[in-house]
DNA sequence: ATGTCAACTTTACACCGTGTCAAGCAAACC
DNA sequence: GGTTTGCTTGACACGGTGTAAAGTTGACAT
C-alpha cells in the first residue's frame, strides 16, 4: 500500500535514515532535503510532521516485519520459554526503531495525533505481553497473588522503550546485557 | 535563598500550582498571568522557560523537603526494609512532582538546559538506589551474579518516573498498588 | 502539435511561542 | 528633588509549522 508511490517511498526511506542517524534536528525541511525534494512537495505527501512520523513508523514495521518477529515468540511450547522469546523479540526490536520512537515520543505532549499513534503502537506491545502472561498462567507458572492483568502491566512497564533508553543509553548496557537481564527480571517478577 | 523575593516566590508558587493542575498549555504567558504580572516581568526573574521550570523543581523540593523524606529510608536497620522504605519514599514523591517533571521531560529533546536539570535530579535518585543496593550487599542479600552497579541500574529503571506514569496513569493503578507492587518487584529482582 | 494532467518548484505569508529591546510609570528611599 | 527598583506596555526578531498561489516540466492522449 505504501510502495505505490516512488517519491513517497523515497521520503519514508530517507526520513527513516535521518531519524536513525540521530542528532540532527529533524525538521520538515531536513526531511525534504534528505529526500531531494522541496519542503512544499513534502506537504503534498504528508499533511503534517506527525503524520509523516507515523507513516515512517508503519514503513519501518513493514520493512522489518515486526509482526513476524513477535509471532516467533508464539511458537514456544511452555510459557517460560515463550516469555524469554517475547522479551528477546521485542527487546531486540527497540534499537531498530529508536530514531522514530524518539521523535514520536518528543511530540507526545504537544501533538494529539502523535500521542495517539504512539499509544497505538504501545498497545500492540501490550498485547504481546498479555499473550506471554496468558501462556504463563495456562502453565500455572504465574506468581501467586498476581492477576494476569497486573502481570501484563508489570511486564509492559519493564519492557518500555523508556526503560531500554535508560539502561542501554544512559547506563551504557550492551544489547546483549539488556536482553539477558530483562529475561531474568521478567522471570523473577512473574514466575511463582 | 529563594524566599528573599516575594514576587519570585509568587511566580514559583503559582507556576507550581499551574503545572500540577495539568492540562493547560503552560506557556510563559500562562505562568505570568497566573502570577498576576506581565510576561516581561516574568523574564525579569527567569531568563528562560527552562530555568523557570528548574527553579520550580528546586522550590518544590525545598517545600516538600525531599531530602528529609529520602533520608528516612536510610534509618532502616537491614537492607531489605531499607529497600522497601526507599521505594516507598521515592515512589510517593513522584506524584507530587508530576506536573513539573512532565514539563521538564517534554523539553528534554529540545533544550539542553532542561535536559541537564532533569538528569541531575535523576542522578540524585540513582544515588538513593545505589545506597539501598549497597545496604543489601552489605547484608549479603544481593542476588548472585548481580553486581552492585547493575542492581542499581535495574532499580533505577524500575523506579523511573516513566514507569510510574505508565502504571498509575495509563494502567490506572492506585498509588497504594504501585508502591506495594514495586516493593515486591524490587525484592524479587534484587534479592538472592 | 496541442492540450491537459500530475508532480513538483519557488515565493510568500500567517501563526505561534520564545526571547529581546526600549520607553514610560510609580512608589520607595535618600 | 533626584535616583533607583520593579513593574508596565508595545514592538519586534527568530525559528518552525503549515497554507496559498502561480509557474515549470514532462508524460500521455488525441
Image: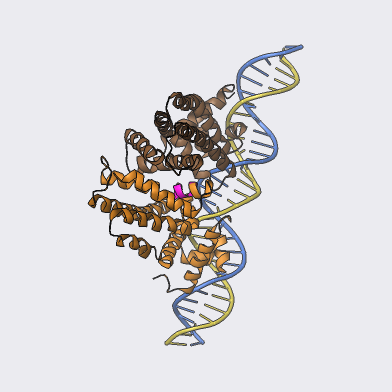
Chain colours: A brown, B orange, C yellow, D blue
Residue A26 versus residue B137 in the image, above or below: above
Q: Quadrant of residue A84?
A: top left
Residue A11 versus residue D27 in the image, above or below: below
Magenta stretch encompasses residue A69? no
First to last magenta residue range: B161-166
Is residue A108 found left or right of C3 in the rendered image? left
Residue B41 percent across, percent down from the top left: 52, 67
Compare residues B91 and A13 and report the one nearer the observer.
Answer: B91
Residue A104 percent across, percent down from the top left: 51, 40
Residue B25 percent across, percent down from the top left: 57, 55
Q: Quadrant of the N terminus of chain B?
A: bottom left
- Give the residue displayed 45% in from the left and 44% down from the top: A145
Residue B148 percent across, percent down from the top left: 26, 46
Residue B147 versus residue C30 in the image, above or below: above
Magenta stretch encompasses residue B162? yes
Compare residues A109 and A145 and report the one nearer the observer.
Answer: A145
- Give the residue displayed 29% in from the left and 51% down from the top: B133
User: What predominant SS class does the magenta segment belong to?
Assistant: helix
- Give the residue displayed 25% in from the left and 49% down from the top: B137
Q: Is residue A127 visible?
A: yes
Is residue A32 found left or right of B75 in the rendered image? right
Amino acid at each position: 500500500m505504501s510502495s505505490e508511490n516512488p517519491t513517497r517511498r523515497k521520503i519514508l526511506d530517507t526520513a527513516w535514515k535521518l531519524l536513525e542517524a540521530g542528532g540532527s534536528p529533524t525538521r520538515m525541511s531536513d526531511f525534504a532535503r534528505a529526500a531531494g525534494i522541496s519542503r512544499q512537495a513534502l506537504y503534498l505527501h504528508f499533511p503534517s510532521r506527525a503524520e509523516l512520523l507515523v507513516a515512517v513508523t508503519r514503513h519501518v514495521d513493514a520493512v522489518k516485519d515486526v509482526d513476524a518477529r513477535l509471532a516467533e515468540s508464539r511458537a514456544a511450547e511452555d510459557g517460560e520459554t515463550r516469555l524469554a522469546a517475547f522479551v528477546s523479540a521485542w527487546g531486540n526490536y527497540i534499537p531498530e526503531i529508536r530514531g522514530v520512537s524518539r521523535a514520536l515520543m518528543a511530540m507526545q505532549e504537544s501533538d494529539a495525533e502523535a500521542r495517539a499513534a504512539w499509544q497505538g503502537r504501545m498497545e500492540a506491545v501490550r498485547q504481546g505481553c498479555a499473550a506471554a502472561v496468558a501462556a504463563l498462567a495456562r502453565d500455572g507458572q504465574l506468581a501467586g497473588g498476581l492477576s494476569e492483568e497486573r502481570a501484563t502491566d508489570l511486564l509492559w512497564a519493564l519492557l518500555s522503550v523508556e526503560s531500554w533508553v535508560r539502561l542501554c543509553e544512559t547506563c551504557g548496557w550492551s544489547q546483549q546485557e539488556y536482553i539477558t537481564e530483562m529475561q531474568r527480571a521478567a522471570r523473577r517478577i512473574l514466575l511463582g
